[in-house]
Image: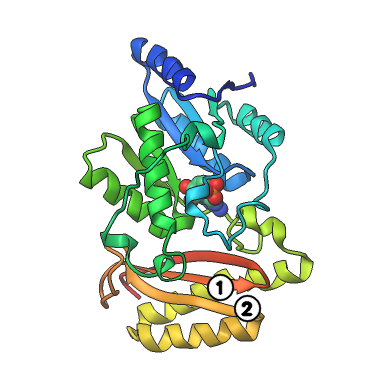
């Protein structure tokens, strides 16, 4: 596979995309923070199925990290990431330095309501403003026809859909299923922080969520089952559980029996915070 072209500036990114558009080619985008794994690659493959050209941004976005979070130790491996893009056949990597995205004097932010309420926001209040701001910038910079986001970050996917709807951003948002390891653990760049013992506990998260979602679909008792799931997670070795919540799959408001739902959770293993979510089927 040929190496992807690399753009480090918005000017270069726009020049490449403009040339594609002049040729009548459609453009798909996959925003990432790098440390790429099979989950990211599945998004790129989907973008390449849906569009003629694919641009992947690799940018560890400082505005979505609080000062206490893992911005400095977040894994960075650009050479390896570029090899992944080449494997999949991505055409362009956008790898801006922080000063290209947030030059001195930068003073704006994009804030999305609706599905950003609660869940992650209760524990990371800065997070979705940071995501919405960088995604808006990336969409204005690359002007893609479509963009692919993972269901792994389900609330983020809902927030990005809301953002594009509310601000008339003409980018089709495509959600992609979560890629998991053989034990059901959702692939995540942050799994690299875990040792073998941590991985063994982490692999319980999906199993417990699946069991809980099935029970909720059957008995409709979201409150009882999520309290039970919290306890089960702690017994499995999770040291802190930020939330386990049953929400409407579309609006992220409280789930109602008979509606399609999503069971979402965030929990801590040492200093590593894991999130995951599974479907609550409408019919038991
Ligand atoms: P990140 O680099 O973690 O910000 O993720 C970039 C994109 O990859 C987001 O749309 C994520 O939802 C998606 N993603 C991360 N992990 C997975 C996974 N295991 N399966 C599918 N998509 C994923």
In which image quadrant can residue 270 be found?
A: bottom right
Depth check: give the residue in front, 67 or 257. Answer: 67
Question: Which quadrant does the C terminus fall into?
Answer: bottom left
Task: Specify which label sits upstream in the sequence, 1 or 2.
Answer: 2
Please determine whether, in this image, residue 269 is positioned above or below residue 142. Answer: below
Question: Which quadrant does the N terminus fall into?
Answer: top right
Residue at 50% x, 83% y is 229
In which image quadrant can residue 133 be found?
A: top left
Residue at 78% x, 66% y is 196
x, y percent for residue 99: 53, 34
In which image quadrant can residue 49 be found?
A: top left
The numbered mark at residue 238 is: 2
x, y percent for residue 134: 42, 42
According to the image, label 1 marks what residue? 267
Residue at 58% x, 81% y is 233
Depth check: give the residue in front, 141 or 49. Answer: 141
* Callouts 1 and 2 close, C-beta under 8 Å: yes
Left or right, residue 240 beside residue 55:
right
Element under disc 1 = strand
Cα distance between the residues tagged 1 and 2? 6 Å
Left or right, residue 137 beside residue 257:
right
Depth check: give the residue in front, 76 or 27. Answer: 76
Left or right, residue 278 beside residue 180:
left
Asked if one can make out residue 188 in the rendered structure from this viewpoint, the answer is yes
Left or right, residue 270 beside residue 247:
right
x, y percent for residue 161: 30, 48
């Amino acid at each position: 596979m040929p190496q992807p072209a690399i753009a480090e500036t918005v000017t270069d990114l726009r020049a490449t995309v403009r040339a594609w558009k002049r040729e009548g080619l459609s453009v798909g985008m996959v925003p990432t923070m790098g440390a790429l794994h099979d989950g990211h690659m599945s998004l790129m493959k989907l973008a390449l199925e849906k569009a003629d050209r694919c641009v992947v941004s690799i940018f560890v976005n400082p505005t979505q990290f609080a000062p206490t979070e893992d911005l400095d130790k977040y894994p960075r491996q650009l050479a390896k990431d570029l090899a992944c893009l080449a494997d999949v056949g991505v055409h362009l990597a956008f790898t801006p330095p922080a000063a290209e995205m947030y030059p001195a004097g930068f003073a704006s932010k994009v804030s999305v309501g609706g599905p950003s309420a609660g869940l992650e926001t209760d524990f990371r209040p800065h997070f979705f403003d940071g995501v919405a701001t960088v995604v808006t910038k990336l969409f204005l910079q690359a002007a893609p026809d479509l963009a692919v986001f993972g269901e792994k970050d389900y609330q983020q996917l809902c927030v990005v859909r809301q953002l594009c709807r509310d601000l008339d951003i003409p980018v089709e948002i495509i959600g992609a299923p979560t890629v998991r390891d053989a034990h059901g653990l959702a692939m995540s760049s942050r799994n690299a922080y875990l040792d073998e013992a941590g991985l063994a506990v982490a692999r319980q998260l999906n199993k417990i969520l699946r069991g809980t979602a099935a029970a909720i679909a059957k008995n409709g008792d979201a409150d009882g089952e999520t309290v039970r799931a919290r306890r089960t997670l702690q017994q499995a070795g999770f040291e802190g559980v930020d939330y386990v919540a049953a929400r409407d799959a579309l609006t992220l408001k409280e789930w109602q029996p008979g509606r399609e739902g999503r069971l979402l959770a965030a929990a801590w293993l040492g200093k590593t915070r894991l999130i995951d979510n599974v479907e609550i089927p409408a019919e038991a």
